[in-house]
Amino acid sequence: MAATKNGEARNRVDGYQKVTGQAKYAGEWQPPGLLHGVVLNSTIAKGKILHIETEKALQLDGVLQVFTHENRPPLAHYDKSYQDLDAPPGTPFRPLFDNKILFNMQPIALVVAESLELARYAASLVTVNYEKKQHEVDFEKQLQHAFIPKDYKAVAPPEPWGSPAEAYHDAKHRLSATYTHPSQHHHPMEPHASTVLWEENGRITVYDKIQGALNSQKYLMGVFGLAQEDVRVLSPFVGGAFGSGLRPQYQLFLATMAALELRCSVRVVLSRPQMFSFGHRPKTHQRFSLAASEDGQLQAMIQEVYGETSRFEDYSENVISWPLVLYNCANASLSYKLVGLDVYTPLDMRAPGGASGIFALECAMDELAYQVGMNPLDFRLKNYAEKDQFEDKPFSSKELRECFRQGAEKFGWKNRPNQPRTMQEGHELIGWGLANGAWEANQKPAHAKAVLAVDGKLTVSSATADIGTGTYTIMSQVAAETMGLELEQVTFKLGDSSLPKAPLEGGSATASSVGSAVREACRQLGKKLLELAQEVDGSPLKDIPFWEVEMEAGQLRLKKDPTKAMALTDILHQNQKDSLAATIDSQPSEEQDNYAIYSHSAVFVEVRVDEALGTVRVSRMVNAIAGGRILNPKTAKSQILGGMVWGVGMALEEESVMDTHYGRFINHDLAGYHIPVNADLQELDVIFVEEEDDIVNPIGAKGLGEVGNVAVAPAIVNAIFHATGKRFRDLPVTVDKILENDEV
Ligand code: MOS
């Protein structure tokens, strides 16, 4: 059954707790006798530790221990710890494993003391002797040594089809250009933190910043050989993550190790500079060769991608499917290679692979549109993908044309002169650009439990997370709607490893996966309520099958004759029950395998460029989204706005600058790493187009965490071209690049 009616715009159910400071984050728990751990990071990028001198630190009153690779407890399960985690696959870094230094800012010691101040001071007294080796962190220099990853995480490039090289050569219009972007870090407001509450019986309760509490629990069980009942992980509130919490990070290991060894509660919070010491969006270097016929039909698409990885793990992401998801072309070839550097392994960051791939693709498509002499919108419509050519499947739904139509209308695209450098106001050149994007809309298996109490309160739970996305709210709404209750009667619980199993919150899959589980759990509960209702003497619902009843206004009632009804609470009363529960395990339908399931976006941008000052202002943006059914237009809009702000950062500001001499990110604070602030943002408009999809999942929702972001950066860069007539192919387009580039 397709639920196409969009949900209500509601405030966040956890909003009050958040704005009043009652929502506690992982680093804010204060158990009695809490000890504080401060992490010491390496100052070289490669080599080994010869000696760590901890004596001075240990002499201080109140310093309990300095853990290093030399005195850490033996950990039998260290190697197995990441097996079957629901996290990006791989063999991640193991803190304090041995004396080898694999990257700069590697955690090499944990100083534990009675106060944070003391621990920090003590850490400053620890000295380290290294044997340095020559590191290699220069991505461009290492391109020549690129290799094909052994295991592709997402998708291996398909065999080329058609004859891309010939078709390219023979085509009337050709474009060949290289696009790059730097490494970027996630930078959630809440830094990574873990507070480990140690109990006398040896059990631990851990507050961790993580996108899936079950991941951290499994990790700790694996590394420290703990039984499931001995470790509970809680993460009821997460202050942003963007992928940085997909894997347990090193503070979790260090805090837990210290707590178990010292038999005390321990907290470890990473500092902002330390947020540069693990996981980043990898640099990419992408060469696009596109060709079109005289009338603008794509003839060839060749994408060659180089992505950054570490020396100790192959990180790969899906940068390459996008040309054939967004366009159809008879001749195509895609390739993806990795460049290994002495850095920490990259990590999925909001729209991993998509943000990179679509940036380059959509800038290249824009360049080719100008060569053909077509309006960039007409050029995209002419080459619109009617099916997903990458996997050769039809789309389950795709209202991208409607996104283009509504977005263009709202933006006023038809008034745009196609010629660049034709609009000006005062000392600013004005440019209008666009791009389109897509993101996967997956449903993953998820469990949920729904419990109705005799007072009419419904509690639904699932071990998912709310990383600021609105999960608490939309899950409460799905439950309220399914059960015919008011939102205020519903409590949704998440962020607890003891709750029914759910996938981590990532990949824009939570609304779809957990939402479906919540709906099914509530329907299951409805069925059980009907059975109970039928046991009551004189029941108005005797012999009625579930599909003939509905749950509305707190009642279970006959659809065709709503006067035949019983209040849900009465059903429990009359059966002498305090509560009734239903638990389900929801699975994606097999039918989904036959379809390409994506959300889509069309982004229209106005920029104002002051060439004398080199500044770019993004004065207007319209982002039209086809994301299936919208569960809550308010939280949904916030998700898309966040993606748009993020896109401004990617296009104009964000860059983790690698100092190749030291092999370290040099701008490692929020003064040096620029993200958009309010002054960088003006008019932001979000449109949700109607999209019905009864294949994607039972609730028809596609997830919005990433699709709002993917097409923003290229739309901005294309607008800068339209304003100035100059192409910028290396992100971010900063003041210096605008000032430098005077070729028109
Ligand atoms: Mo996201 S990068 O799926 O947390």
Image: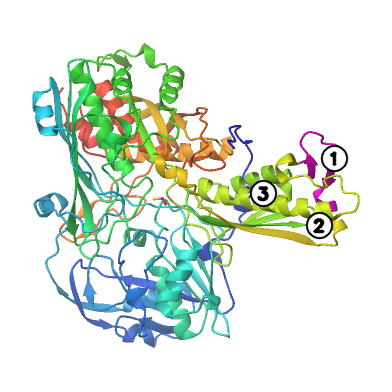
Compared across the picture, whether 693 is left or right of 728 comes to right
User: Residue 129: x percent and y percent?
Assistant: 20, 78
Q: Within 8 Å: ligand 1 and the Cβ of disc 1?
A: no
User: Residue 111: x percent and y percent?
Assistant: 39, 78
Instruction: Return the residue at label 1.
Output: 564
In the displayed structure, 683 sits above or below 635; it is above
Q: Quadrant of residue 611?
A: top left
Instruction: Return the residue at label 2.
Output: 454
Q: Please state the extent of the stretch shown in magenta in the rendering.
A: 552-572
Residue 523 is labelled as: 3
What residue sits 67% from the left and 49% below the top? 523
Q: Within 8 Å: ligand 1 and the Cβ of disc 2?
A: no
In the displayed structure, 216 sits above or below 636; it is below
Q: Is residue 469 visible?
A: no
Of residues 209 and 336, the one drawn nearer to the viewer in this rendering? 336
Marks 1 and 3: CB-CB under 8 Å?
Answer: no
Q: CA distance from mark 2 to mark 1?
A: 21 Å
Local SS, label 3 = helix
In the displayed structure, 129 sits above or below 363; it is below
Q: Residues within 10 Å of mark 3 (few under 14, many from 20)?
A: many
Q: Residues within 10 Å of mark 2 (few under 14, many from 20)?
A: some
Q: CA distance from mark 1 to mark 3?
A: 19 Å
What residue sits 37% from the left and 79% below the top? 77
Could you tell me the amino acid type at mark 3? Arg
